[in-house]
Image (cartoon, rainbow, N blue to C red):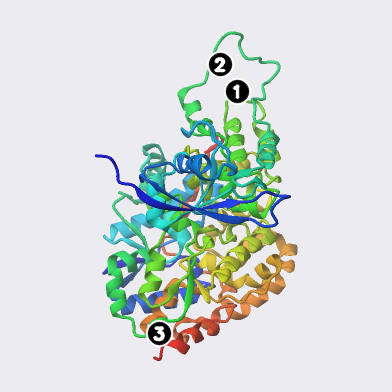
Amino acid sequence: MRIAYYPGCIAQESAKELDMATRWVCKNLGIELVEFPNFSCCGSGFIDEANEVLNIAINARNLAIAEKAGLDVLTICSTCQGMLTLAKVRMQDPKVKARVDAALKPIGIEYRGTVQVKHLLKVLTEDIGLPAVKAKVRRPLHGMKVGAFYGCHLLRPADEMQSESGEEPRSFEDLLAAIGATPVDYRGRVMCCGFPIQFVKPATASAIAGRQILDAKAHGADAMATPCPLCHLSLDAYQNKAAKEVRAPLDMPIFHLPQVVALALGASPEELGLSRHLVRTDGALAKVNASAPA
Amino acid sequence: MPEEKISVPFEVYRYQPGKDTTARYQKYTLDLVPHTPILTALLQIRAEVDPSLGLRYSCRSAICGSCAMQINSKSRLACETQVGPEVARHGRIVVEPMRNQPVIRDLIVDQSRFWEEYNKIEPHLKLDPRRPMPEGKATSMTPAQVDRFKEVPRCIACAACYSACPAAEADPGFPGPMALAKLYRFAVDPRDTAHEERLRRIQPNGLWLCLRCHLCTEACPKDVRPSERIRDLKEMAIAVQGATELGSRHAVGFKENLKGAGQLNEMKLVRATDGLLGMVGQLGQGIRIYRKKPEIMKKPRKIEGMDELEKIYAALDPPPKEGP
């Protein structure tokens, strides 16, 4: 399949490893990524707080770029997925559409609303399908217990995000099972990572992140995996702060979603930039090696 | 044709502070038709199995808001949540008291903090004494004015949103979704004369602690959509007061950030929010991250079609004075 690749800012900057893993997975599963150097940032939920209509217009422009090329959009970030979908939903309101169109039409941009926005999780589980993913697995992650961590904007509000469920999704767990890992069921998997208030009240943000990591740990997780690079920042890059806030030692490897898939499909840690994580991932990888000879 | 009964395993939270040392989960199994409300099942347990079970309820019709509790970790009204889908999804039904409020007994919680936060936002019209409400006459509001807050009066104060809120859980300074949704209702009511004062007061008092996780909107049985009302409040607060709080500085800083390259400049954003002094405080963590991810210092590539983005900004920002 061909799809417009919307990497988002973070995967091109501090989470470069997410971009590396995405390209690896897509190449190996026959997903052709079409790149558009004119995509802008989605506003990350912050522009929505400052100016709702501007946020919609920025993302309507992004959507129109893919729409004009006749392609759906692939996102690899829960927040990008949320913001692009939000624009799609809000543009169904004729009053909003009129205001946004008044800004887009003079610069020759037309948004019609025919384009679909799909996170990689959905493309893998629905378009490619779990049997096809499973067929490509060369090194099943047997023995590795993984806590999926969805990221709010992928799920909620469920009606607007057209998500599988606001609080009880299962597609990520199904994907983890398909690649041989053991998914861990814990309440924190659909909770917030704390990232949106990292700049407002860092201690509270880290306490929230720490809570979810502790919850995953209490349910036996060797690692967590997330479809959102902002959750990844909060859970990985700030894990030392989270440990301080919850007054517990934390040593939880945090994978990006395509990294766990690529590992099962046979990619090496180097190809996936695992050394770029703040928390080492070897402990979790050792679980696989111990029980499943390559 | 009558529905067939299914076996429904319940695990119900039991705890009496002062008497029990720890909470326990008591198991009951009932044969019920799938559409049985969980409240009906709990009342059956109390009537037929265990009269000591403590719970709060009244109308059984999702009107009074008394029976909010956690059902398989979701904050819901027990009277409108049916057993069938819960058993199908989880194989059992775990019933626990609401979160973020201390347990009085079993499923009954102390709602004092929830109501204190509600009272703090002064949930009543503040009128201009020089312009009293016309005696014996309806006050005039256009349908469009009423529409702006049409969702909020549906609230039945069940506190499911408060129970679901991770900000309320982590930070006692956060007013909670319901109080903020109510604040919104008065902040857009044309009869109220304290709009600016309300928005000024709520900013340092927790408005920007909302994580926009939308768990409150998911929990709300009346579709008040508190998280969306809180978003509206944030934009209104910036409009009356500018970017004065860390949260509003971050939101406005982010919006301004894209004017450079169309993509996020991470370092510039930290500087805009925290200022140079704040950045020094984050230096240790910054260096830790930089060692592994040197791109945080990199200037982003300028997107093609930046002129289009600039024109969109010129057309839609700043927003018109009357608010969103």
Q: CA distance from mark 1 to mark 3?
A: 64 Å
Q: Quadrant of residue A281?
A: bottom right
Indicate whether A121 appears above or below B39.
below
Residue at image coords 58%, 50%:
B165
Question: Residue A122, position in %: x, y?
Answer: 35, 63
Q: What chain is tagged by disc 1?
A: B
Kindly identify which residue carries mark 2. B139
Q: Quadrant of the N terminus of chain B?
A: top left
Q: Amino acid at mark 3?
A: Ala
Going from the N terminus, do you reach mark 1 or mark 2 first? 2
Foreground: A269 or B274?
A269
Asked if disc 1 and disc 3 are in contact, CB closer than 8 Å, the reply is no
User: Would you call the spot at circle 3 few (<14 residues within 10 Å), some (14-19), or many (20 or more)?
Assistant: some
Which residue, as the protein is rendered here, is positioned at the far front?
A: B48
Indicate whether A53 appears above or below A182.
above
Question: Residue B45, position in %: x, y?
Answer: 50, 44
Left of B71 or right of it: where is B103? right
Kindly identify which residue carries mark 3. A267
Left of B70 or right of it: where is B286? right
Kindly identify which residue carries mark 1. B191
Which residue, as the protein is rendered here, is positioned at the far bottom?
A: A293
Q: Amino acid at mark 2?
A: Thr
Foreground: A60 or A272?
A272
Q: Amino acid at mark 1?
A: Arg
Callout 1 and callout 3 share a chain: no
Q: What chain is tagged by disc 3?
A: A
